[in-house]
Amino acid sequence: MEIAALLALSSGLFLGWSLGANDAANVFGTAVGTRMVKFSTAAIVCSIFVVLGAVFSGSGTTDTLGKLGAINALGGAFVAAFAAAITVYWMTKAGLPVSTSQAIVGAIIGWNVFSGSPTDSQTLIKILTTWIACPILAALIAAPLFKLTQAYLRWAKFHILRLDAYTRVALIFAGGFGAYSLGANNIANVMGVFVEVSPFSDFDITHYLTFTSIQQLFLLGGISIAVGVFTYSKKVMLTVGTDILPLSPVAAWVIVISHSIVLFMFASQGLEAFLKDAGLPTIPLVPVSSSQAVVGAVIGIGLLKGGKEIHWQTIGRISAGWVVTPLASALVCYIMLFFSQNVFLQDVYH
Amino acid sequence: MGKVSPLFRRTRLIEARIDEFLDHISESGIIFRRAVKGYLQSGPAEEFDDAMLHIDDIESRADELRRTIEAELYERTLIPDLRADVLTLLEDMDNLINVCEANCYRFSIETPEIPEEFHQDFNNLTETASECIDAVVMAGRAYFRNIQAVRDHTHKVILLESEADKISTKLKRAIFAADIPKVEKIHLRYFVDRIDELPNAAEDIADQLGIFTVKRSI
């Protein structure tokens, strides 16, 4: 692979790093923050499953982003990912809640506007609807799951220490599932814009098994997420968890599972095929925000408890971020594309 | 004990230690009742001394267990969200044995003269205190295993504490109405208060357990 191509991918890798640094906290934040799971355990499980999810289940959401805008020049892809990364970095620095999914969608629209490519309105509506549906769905899954868990624990009458031990194991499994879903759903944010201009080529591992160029791209993206998890997520994990609602470890497990189910539903091609075969309406494969899935699940449980403990101000701040992120990212991308093309004389679209 | 996965063997061991610790608390109440009964029957004689030694032994073992449990909870960062509550509970429970032991020593050192007319009430007060300890231990066990049952037991503790209050008030009135020297009255009052300290301490634990239980519900 050429050095130039690797340099072009670096913005995606940066975005992957920041995704790993921030979003791993949605999967293991409460578990590590409350000292139920050691950070090293969380980081290893998270990294392995993020990579697996990205490589084996990441293509569904990538197709959707491709339909929104197929960035056809490596320079353009670099700028789009870089604009999204800058937006994420800037908003995180400003203490504003941010989603890489929304940042990258904003950046793609910025590229569409700049290059004069049409934005597929149907795909855009599908993405926007999914963003709204994501936290609602997470709340709808979390509330009954919380009730069921409560009823089961009442029936099972575990000793406080046994429950603690079981919860630790359950949190690791839930974290693994969450990381897999995160990799599957969010790899499109990191590497999606490079799919059309991938510098890799397919190679055969065995006679029957091919490691496609997209899978190689996703592996690289997955590794960058894993690096983000190892190098920076501890800080985020230790501060996350009780921002919206004080949580017990069991409630944290319910939230991680609900969040993971939602991310998995919006990423699984297998589930899509199953629903299609059964003649049922399919779930769109769209990269969603794992933070918003967590927020939805927390609200679901909070409302079940009467809603008094929910910090609505925090939720208000998060909601504002939903609108600001794509707009800011689109604007940053447009400005950067302008400079890349006219000042640095780079090809940003064909 | 059924087959336990090696993953949870250590947890099982600490559970067993907590159970053993609570057994000792419950036992201390029973032995204290026996000690007071023995004292009322034949003064600080063999039966009383045996009981006192027994409580002494229980107190040492309970202390040892509590320290081991505390160390395990801290070293293995178990139940991080509830650890402070559990440690408070264990320490307060341990205090019940200490009160039993200290009372035995008071009887042994101060050898109060208790007229026969007060024996029945002293016995009743000690028995109620012992039942109170038993009920608070049951509440403690329920906190660890079955939080729905905690309220039933703490309610019993509160009822028994109020019963103990009535007995001690009645006994103190009778003591101060009796034809004995003032100094003996004050000495007897002191012993009534010391025995009554047990149900009061148990009630404080029951109150705390009520709050801990709310925190434990997920």
Image (spheres, coloured by chain):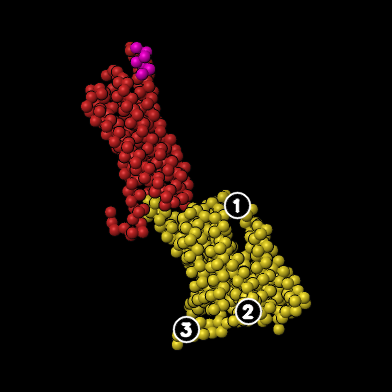
Q: Label 2: which residue?
A: A3
In the image, taking residue A281 as reference, residue B134 lies left or right, namely left
Whole-Å distance between the Cαs marked 1 and 3?
Answer: 52 Å
Tag 1: Cα neighbours inside 10 Å, few (<14), some, or many (≥20)? some
Q: Nearer the viewer, residue A308 or A54?
A: A54
Relative image position of residue A11 (x, y in whole percent): 64, 72
User: Quick one: which chain is yellow?
Assistant: A
Relative image position of residue A141 (x, y in whole percent): 51, 63
Q: Are marks 3 and 2 in contact (CB under 8 Å)?
A: no
Quadrant where the N terminus of chain A is found in the figure: bottom right
Q: Which residues are magenta?
A: B181-187
Which residue, as the protein is rendered here, is positioned at the far bottom? A207
Up/down of A10 relative to B126, above or below: below
Q: Chain of mark 3?
A: A
Q: Label 1: which residue?
A: A311
Residue shown at 66% from the left, 69% from the top: A84
Asked if residue A257 shows in the view, the reply is no
Tint of chain B: red
Name the kind of residue labelled 2 in the image: Ile
Up/down of A123 relative to A261, above or below: below
Which badge, 1 or 3, is on the more N-terminal residue? 3
Tag 2: Cα neighbours inside 10 Å, few (<14), some, or many (≥20)? few
Residue shown at 37% from the left, 26% from the top: B194
Which badge, 1 or 2, is on the more N-terminal residue? 2
Name the kind of residue labelled 3 in the image: Ile
Q: Label 3: which residue?
A: A205
Whole-Å distance between the Cαs marked 1 and 2?
Answer: 48 Å
